[in-house]
Amino acid sequence: MIKNEVAVVGVGCTKFGDRYERSFEELICDAAFEAYADAGIEPDEIEAAYLGTYLPGPGGGKAAVSLADALRLYDRPITRVENYCATGTDAFRNGCLAIASGVYDIVLVLGAEKLKDRGGRGLPRLGHPLLARGNTAPGLFALAANRYMHTFGLGRETLAKVAVKNHRNGARNEKAHLRMEVSEEQVLKAPIIAWPFGLLDCCPTTDGAAAAIICRASLAKRFRKPAVLVKGAGLAVSTGRPYFDPTFDYLGFRSTQAAARQAYTMAGVAPRDVDFAEVHDCFTWTEISNVEDLGFCRKGEGGRLVEEGRTALEGDIPVNPSGGLKSFGHPIGASGVRMIYECVTQLRGEAGARQVKDAELGLAHNVGGPGAVACVIVLGRS
Amino acid sequence: MIKNEVAVVGVGCTKFGDRYERSFEELICDAAFEAYADAGIEPDEIEAAYLGTYLPGPGGGKAAVSLADALRLYDRPITRVENYCATGTDAFRNGCLAIASGVYDIVLVLGAEKLKDRGGRGLPRLGHPLLARGNTAPGLFALAANRYMHTFGLGRETLAKVAVKNHRNGARNEKAHLRMEVSEEQVLKAPIIAWPFGLLDCCPTTDGAAAAIICRASLAKRFRKPAVLVKGAGLAVSTGRPYFDPTFDYLGFRSTQAAARQAYTMAGVAPRDVDFAEVHDCFTWTEISNVEDLGFCRKGEGGRLVEEGRTALEGDIPVNPSGGLKSFGHPIGASGVRMIYECVTQLRGEAGARQVKDAELGLAHNVGGPGAVACVIVLGRS
């Protein structure tokens, strides 16, 4: 079983952003060696690894061997996991299963992605069948956002407040991609990408990597810092074409609801027990809908949560203290592991200017597809 | 732990070949529903799934949701695994870890690949950095084959005997892609692809899918047929560019050796305990070298093994009773799971005209990269 039997003992994360100066392999090294130092572990102690990366290498397959070559992790098992924008959290989940199986004691989970300098072969080639027909990610999420805003009477001002909050958090985070505060007016006046999303409602295109070293909980004491325990993990794939599904109400994602249910059940906790969360905010609306699907409030109340400041750093359920995808950036395969990095940093009380008070239980959540797949990880202080 | 705690209770496999008439999703259904019927299980009992597929969808990511949509397996975890030509066996290995973790009781492992009708976006775009510079898979394996043949004094006649043997087995297998016997003369006279490989030294380009249903061994009794137990599983990634590694001797693959060591250690068996093996034979030479790296004979003796008929169906260590990649075909992500299908079929005594006598312990082995990664699974009768 995973609950309380898997511990995170080291985390690392590169600066996110335009990382033209660092290759895919160099970003992997930067994240991994920070995690090695954080744990106080020798690289050779890693028994197995999982690499979460979304975009394939030229033609389709370079991932597991890329990690091996970058880190000189030879002659041991390395598996590449890919699961849309939930790639990073699912890689982490599979690392936890591998530890819980009893086969491996110490596992490295690494998420990495280069989106900025792929010679034009990056985002424009993204693979959803709808995207291939001219629908972009902003366009697809906007369909749901419009229906949601109509149904619950939300304006763009509420969406903008998510951007303001997350940029405020990200500005305090030296590793964030877009380290600037933005005003509600700036968000509202930014060029429209796909109504209701303006440029500042959208997360940026980012390079980055993040790493987590996990081990059997009974071994956690030997590492440098207090361990953080994995409490629950859930993954749910719903249809890959939710917009063609006649039961889809355009008000939220069943995949998030199902993954959260799995994770809460495993952890034996309720949403109200969660002290803070890293929530997938590829667009401002996505955070509003996801906090509902995660159970932090009822459907339709997510807007009020941000308006009342309850999801702010000082609120009762801080959401995206890191800055979120919105400000921290979203290198697809890296994002989920970067969320684990943030949860662990917060639970250790090491988050500095963006520290959540009395953080004892944190949650990381990715959604991809859009809406096709979601992964939820619950982490707690020992 | 995996050993004796994970059981295979159902397997399915499509006809391999030019499957222009069946889509990726339809091949998934064909394999899965055969496995459901084989196990006597309702589809809804599947708690989690792993999909092994190598080539990405258009742009990079369609896999986990493709499986969900094809099989209507909604609201549960599905992970796509990719690991070069070891994709299928590694998906199976991760399914075993998921069962062994105690989190899931019943897991579906599915390998699927369409190589034939990808509108030119299939094999020519294969992703190894060497391939991108004009080296093809036959060309790369040929470098090692030539060095090996020089070192150990082998001729093309010995390589041809592998093709003759595997086509003889495959001709007895109604699901094989190339169901024809070939003579040594035919193999030797076939057009040269990359010396020493002629056309009939190379496995074909194939579509297909295969499935395995695995469960906690203690639950295996409720299914239709006697369970087959997973005894060992190993995965090893060596450098992605072995041909640039100055310690590479061009005589065999370190990844196979390391993966085999892991699997034998877990199973508590020695190579001599293995009754038959499905061995990666993308080229005739690959089988000869791999049987050595798997420990069935000493380095340099693999040619004699086939010359003396010891790897034939009636030999003391039958290799590729299915027909192997050579005759059965090689839809990349499907191959490993297809090997599990063959091992289970043999261990149950259901292999008909290609049945290995007294098969109690079988082994499945994939290598990819070339030589960059290998996966070994050991399976035994209850």
Image: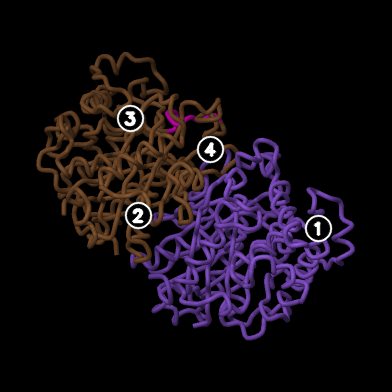
Chain colours: A brown, B purple
Residue A53 visible at all: yes
Amino acid beneath label 1 = Leu
Q: Tell me if A81 is positioned left or right of B138 in this view.
A: left
* Residue numbers of the magenta segment: A134-140
Chain name for mark 2: A
Residue A125 percent coordinates (x, y): 55, 32
Q: Which residue is mark 3?
A: A15
The mark found on residue A127 in the picture is 4
State the image quarter where residue B197 is shown.
bottom right
Mark 1 touches mark 3? (CB < 8 Å): no
Residue hosting label 1: B200
Alpha carbon distance from label 2 to label 4: 37 Å
Q: Nearer the viewer, residue B230 or A89?
A: B230
Residue at mark 2 to residue at mark 3: CA–CA distance: 26 Å
Tell me the quarter of the image containing the N terminus of chain A: bottom left
> Which label sits on residue A45?
2
Dot 3, crowdedness within 10 Å: few (<14), some or many (≥20)? Answer: many
Q: CA distance from mark 4 to mark 3?
A: 27 Å
The quarter of the rendered structure image containing the C terminus of chain A is: bottom left
Amino acid identity at mark 4: Gly
- The answer to whether tags 2 and 4 share a subunit is yes
Q: Nearer the viewer, residue B349 or A285?
A: B349
Give the residue at x 68% y 76%.
Answer: B318
Q: Which sits earlier in the primary sequence, circle 2 or circle 4?
A: 2
2 or 1: mark nearer the eye: 2
Q: Is residue A137 magenta?
A: yes
Q: Give x and y (percent) for residue A253.
A: 36, 44
| Contact? badges 2 and 3 (CB < 8 Å) | no
